[in-house]
Amino acid sequence: MTSEEFRRRGKELIDYIADYYDNINQLKPLSQVEPNYLRELLPENAPEEPDNFDAILKDIETKIVPGVTHWQSGNFYGYFPGNSSYPGILGEMYSAMFNGIGFSWINGPAMTELETITLDWLGKLIGLDASFLSFNADGSLSSGGGVIQGTASEATIVAMLAARCKAIENFKAENLEYTQDDLIHFSSKLIGYGTDQTHSSGEKASMIINCRFRGIQTADNGSLTKDLLENAIQEDREKGLIPFFIIGTFGTTAIGATDDFVGISEASQAHNLWFHLDAAYAGAALICPEYRNLAPGMNLADSFVFNPHKWLLVNFDCSAIWFKNSYYVKIALSIHRDYYKNSATDSGLVRDYKDWQIPLGRRFRALKLFLVMRMYGAKGLRQHIRRSVGYTEWLETELSKDDRFKILFPRTLSLLVFQLSMDSIQALSKTNLDSEQLSAMHKQANLRFSQFIIESGEIFLTTASVKNSTAIRVAIGSPSTDKSCME
Ligand code: PLP
């Protein structure tokens, strides 16, 4: 492709993108294709000769697009939102243009420094304590700070690795005569905690770092309390295990629950646990001061992650994690070779983000965050969040007025979880059912109701399993959602 052709095709693509977003609510959000549909439509091997761009475009239009699920549709209410925006897309274009792999400051000074600065901006906007920020008041680099990871799952692995490193360092300091076998024995006893509502990434992190993980059973509200955590710690200590890590969540995936961060912090301090706070979805709302009271004690965490790529208009991927003390992350993940050596690193004046993440290479993701923050301004971002919450409040009010439905949990921001009510099932039944028959019918009806909505294809939503039954989750957050979507 020549630069001439790139100019032409690129401009056409920009128009195509704008048309796509202008008309997105006319598309069915969920792709209607059958499994393995694409295998039959594309050749078995890559072409030997260069293909013609028009032919490729035609294939994209007729074969690829039908298999796309339109996450940006205003009628997409599944999982949690995964926002995109024009500034976010432009940021991705800049990043693709430079295509640097800036893992150390020396091979990406702007990439590194823009990330440090934008994460301080963002941290301040969501009300993080100064101890999470990279810059001290005098402009020098602090021991804390943020870094962009691809996903919250990766960020949680990094936090867990740092926590394990801290536990091992403490063990070494307390057992100066330790042997390698002692260390192996110690590591094999480590146990991390979450709850039955913690996102699967917590358990996956423990699978990857090869430690135990306990999902503490929560009460009906799905929230972890200090007592529940203390009891689990005590039980596991009695079994000879060594608690070292706890994930608290602001806005759990299935039902939007929030844990007791003050209680978790107290238990963590008493038992030397690393407190990692997962606000992957709900963290975006903290940009609005009025929602900060939903996460009291959030600043007590050791690490805090949230995904601007979920509900804050930054294109995937952009997961922001902040540490109060990056020392253990760097001990856990730094690795040295001659080919990484350079005078900037030796000066100790710069950050090399390769030491804050699992891969070596990294993308220039700060650009899209920078563009989004500058082009929306904090005001525009707050407006976007409040708009989603407003629509969800409206839906909550409508459903509350209708006794065919029951809202199962207090609404968290823009996530509403509801079911067909038991009364509506009783009313539908011609005969008198005993309570067992009624609850079986209720379960079936909710399952079929959710399947019916999803199969209709008009809107997309996902379900949660609540008390052995199916509940419907509506997660509103697309900037394309408007009043017409609510009709
Ligand atoms: N934590 C919570 C609470 C989530 O809801 C999710 C995903 O929805 C994740 C973590 C994982 O996010 P990611 O896809 O960025 O790994």
Image (cartoon, rainbow, N blue to C red):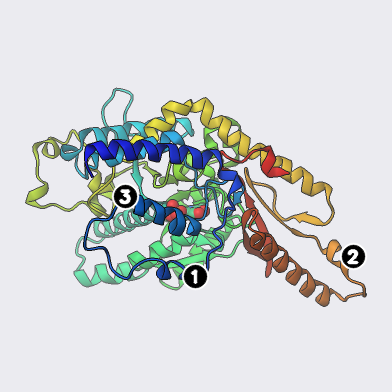
Q: Residue at x 37, y 66 (%)?
A: 42
Query: Label 1 amino acid?
Result: Pro
Residue 292, compared with residue 440, is above or below; it is: above
* For discs 3 and 2, the disc positioned in front in the rendered view: 3
**Numbered label attached to residue 35:** 1
Give x and y (percent) for residue 66. 50, 57
Q: Residue at x 43, y 46 (%)?
A: 305
Label 3 close to label 2 by CB (< 8 Å): no
* For discs 2 and 1, the disc positioned in front in the rendered view: 1
Is residue 403 shown left or right of residue 164? Answer: right
Give x and y (percent) for residue 438. 83, 72
Is residue 111 shown left or right of residue 294? Answer: left
* For discs 1 and 3, the disc positioned in front in the rendered view: 3
Q: Nearer the viewer, residue 392 or 263?
A: 392
Q: CA distance from mark 2 to mark 1?
A: 39 Å
Q: Residue at x 29, y 52 (%)?
A: 52
Residue 300 visible to an observer of this rendering? yes
Which residue is denoted by mark 2 in the rendering?
Answer: 427
**Residue 373 location, quadrant:** top left
Q: Nearer the viewer, residue 434 or 323?
A: 434
Q: Nearer the viewer, residue 34 or 374?
A: 34
Give x and y (percent) for residue 275. 44, 51
Q: Residue furthest right?
A: 431
Which residue is denoted by mark 3 in the rendering?
Answer: 53
Q: CA distance from mark 3 to mark 2?
A: 60 Å
| Mark 1 or mark 3, earlier in chain | 1
